Image: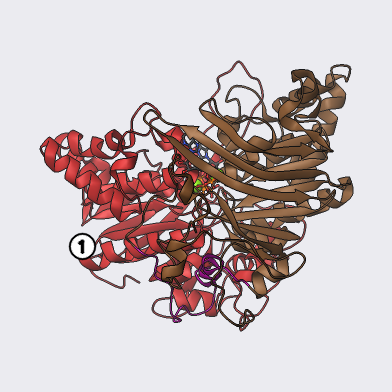
Chain colours: A red, B brown
Amino acid sequence: MNRSAHPVVRIDRLSKIYRPKRTLGSSHSSHPVIALNQVSLDIERGEIFGLVGGSGSGKTTLGRLLVKLEKSDGGKIYLSENDTTRIRGQALKAFRAKVQMIFQDPYQSLNPQLTIFDTVSEPLIIHKTSSRSTRIKKVRKVLTTVGFSPAEDYFSRYPHELSGGQRQRVAIARAIVLNPEFIVADEPTSMLDATNSFQIFNILSDLRKKQRVTFLFITHSLAAANFLCDRIGVIYHGNLVEKGPARQIIRHPAHPYTKALLDALPSYCQDPACTFHNTLLESPRDLPGSSHYCPFFTLCREADPYQCASETPNMIHLSATHSAACFKAG
Amino acid sequence: MTLLDVSNLSIGYRLRDRLIKAVDSVSFSLEPGKTLGFVGESGSGKTTIGMSLLRLLPENASVLSGSIRFEGRDVYSLSDESLRAIRWKKIAMIFQAAMNALNPVQRINEQVAEALLIHHPKMSKRDALARTAQLFESVGIPENRHADYPHQYSGGMKQRAIIAMALICQPLLLIADEPTTALDVIVQGQILKVIRAIQQEMAIAMIFISHDISVVADVCHDIAVMYGGRIIEAGQRSEILETPAHPYTRMLLASNLTLSDHSFDMPTVHQSRKANIRHLGSTKENDMCPFVCHCRQITDHCQATPQKWMVLSSSHRVFCNNIAGDLTK
Ligand SMILES: Nc1ncnc2c1ncn2[C@@H]1O[C@H](COP(=O)(O)OP(=O)(O)OP(=O)(O)O)[C@@H](O)[C@H]1O
Ligand SMILES: Nc1ncnc2c1ncn2[C@@H]1O[C@H](COP(=O)(O)OP(=O)(O)OP(=O)(O)O)[C@@H](O)[C@H]1O
Ligand SMILES: [Mg+2]
Ligand SMILES: [Mg+2]
């Protein structure tokens, strides 16, 4: 199924389970959350791969595993054919310079004690890449790139003195200042108006074009993914349910959950030529009694009461590049 | 009676070396049960306006001029006691990124019930929890997750809890600052539906702040478009969406991403951006167009003369004196 023999990033049956901590003196028992369930995908060099899915579907978890902020509970991640789960010491430091994440929430990810200048120059200091004067130049350049102008006006400000969208642009500046090879961009424009997010998308596209930076672009909007991404993977409750070329997914979605994501876009984002699929149940049906079933069973209007309730669907190839995990696909 | 009337409001922030004007001569009003959407660029002053309505501006901010009247009373001359009677009970706010503010060591339903008990000390905890459970049900938090801790929730579920918390005292006016920004489209659609239902049920008025015009288009009766601290265009939903007049509004609508093929001519955002906040002190600049640095329709006239409001209909006005020809195109 690999489109290319040498993907930059290869994710092989990656799983992550969050087990409830028994702290806080509580007797309340919550269940472990399967945040990722055997997810496999490849990203090629210079590709923008869109990971699209609902809240809590495991997108950020996958991003955090990719940049090694968290350990997996199974499966492997390869970066340029090297198993990243094993790297330590100097190799790990080099890895951290090459792989960056733009965090979803700039309210939490920016250190409130650091000025904007210090925030953006910190990675340069950690990786000892330059003198102070080059740092100033680099910070100015990268802040201008993300739309602060004149950049110096913002050097001495603190995050709380910026609006939400301005913080988000600082987070982007920080992630690109080291010229990384691979960037996980977790909802990087969720707080920006359309004209500004358009500008950011152009910045990401440019980085890809000029420096062959590879991206995992995380979003919940298929409209954004449609514009920016080469390929899209759709994830639902930790399960990759569909992947393929962006246009193909938008025009010919195969999985009922992908269809529901398309339907749910505000009417102002719809394509008049696209049909309304109506695959989502208003209220969920009960879980089947069996231990194997389709993860989307409870919300799927099209579910087969027998097959979908007793078997877990595997990815079915609909074409060389397009696959979906649904019995009814293809 | 008009519920909220804001007139000529200007707000500044003190920085170490200077003052910046974040909100500039903003006027609008809101009738009971109506929803007004604020849409615009990041940093254009939307949150600042929202915070000022509740007198919750940060310490380095000050109202430079103008007035805010809620139910006919000037909010900035209320006593602390009268203010307490209004805040949260009559005007509630969902803060931008509020979900980070949930207490990590307290169960979510208890936090929400507590918010109710603070304002209704005589209510029993059991009743407060029951009311919380009801509201959780209507914002779509499944029963078996009501008593979780915040870290066990995904972003979307936290936001549902925050919305429930804002609604728990049944306010007359809800200020929702980017309430769906952290949510996925499916949940966003469901939350907008919930908000609409509650608007109607409680006859609640709303100020709905979002950078996303497609979301604002989905829930608001009226829309105010902001740029650089100013409202630059305001009107009924259909006027703004169908006959946008200001070059920024037009650009905003044109860069809204859709499921269509994006092969059309995309608006270029000028890279040579000047800070979109003007510094105080240069009063002459006050009525200049905030959009001059980015406008494609700019003329010499725009840079030389102060702008005036142009009235396009009884509800539609635009802060640009260079409106070209037929707006329906
Ligand atoms: N530290 C944690 N402890 C326990 N559960 C967690 C933790 N982090 C995430 N989860 C759970 O794992 C699942 C996946 O969460 P994740 O943050 O990856 O989702 P997401 O797709 O990024 O969602 P969103 O669009 O809301 O950001 C959710 O059910 C979440 O509640
Ligand atoms: N506490 C503060 N101190 C100084 N300046 C501030 C402060 N808070 C906001 N600002 C500035 O005031 C302006 C308006 O900010 P505001 O948060 O109101 O914008 P916004 O329209 O809500 O933006 P966003 O869509 O990004 O949330 C911005 O230029 C911002 O940098
Ligand atoms: Mg996330
Ligand atoms: Mg804001």
**Residue at x 40% of width, y 29% of height:** A112
Amino acid at the residue labelled 1: Gln
Identify the image quadrant of the N terminus of chain A: bottom left
Tag 1 residue: A211
Instruction: Give the quadrant of residue B317.
Output: bottom right
Image mark 1: chain: A
- In the image, taking residue A74 as reference, residue A143 lies left or right, namely left
Q: Is residue B62 above or below residue B293?
A: above
Can residue A292 be seen here?
yes
Q: Is residue A246 above or below residue A299?
A: below
Q: Is residue A163 above or below residue B17?
A: below
Q: Nearer the viewer, residue A154 or A80?
A: A154
Total of numbered circles in the picture?
1
Magenta stretch bounds: B244-270
* Residue at the outermost left position: A131
Identify the image quadrant of the C terminus of chain A: bottom right
